[in-house]
Amino acid sequence: MALYVVKHEHSNETCPARNKEMGGMLLTHLSAENAGRNGLKINAEAVIDGAHTLYLIVEAEDEKNVKKFMEPFAMAGSVEVMPASVCEVVVERGSC
């Protein structure tokens, strides 16, 4: 499985946390069970306080799976999927 960092940004006006129903749906979407059903493993997630920015570190077979999984977030703002590597791999290959 490949490693990806996902960045999602939205405005204060489109913040899913402002709506309990929408927030609940997104939490369910991000659950380990749902991610697994969609071929992803979420290793970490964090929201930058006050910045309306979510970061995920995920493993998936390919970038297409990650983008499809993130489609609900694209309704509220931008989604960027970036291929990534762990530090050990970067050092082994001698370059970021």
Image (cartoon, rainbow, N blue to C red):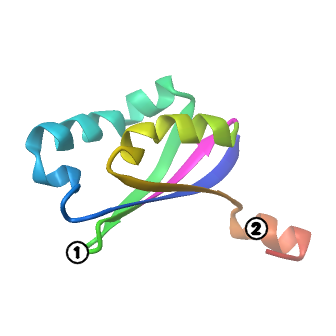
Q: Earlier in the sequence, mark 1 or mark 2?
A: 1
Q: Where's the C terminus, which quadrant? A: bottom right
Judge whether residue 3 is colored magenta.
Answer: no
Could you say where residue 28 lies in the image, as x and y percent from the top left?
Answer: 28, 34
Kindly report the distance in space between the C-alpha atoms of the residues bearing marks 1 and 2.
Answer: 32 Å
For the residue marked with disc 1, what is the amino acid? Gly
Q: Is residue 94 left or right of residue 49?
A: right
Of residues 96 and 82, the one drawn nearer to the viewer in this rendering: 82
Could you say where residue 6 lies in the image, as x and y percent from the top left?
Answer: 52, 56
Report which quarter residue 92 is drawn in.
bottom right
Q: Is residue 28 left or right of residue 40?
A: left
Residue at (45%, 33%) from the top-left corner?
Answer: 35
Residue at (38%, 38%) from the top-left corner?
Answer: 72
Q: Which mark is residue 50?
A: 1
Could you say where residue 42 lies in the image, as x and y percent from the top left?
Answer: 48, 45
The range drawn in magenta is 55-61
Circle 1 sits in a helix, a strand or a loop, which is it? Answer: loop
For the residue marked with disc 2, what is the amino acid? Glu
Is most of the magenta stretch helix, strand or loop?
strand
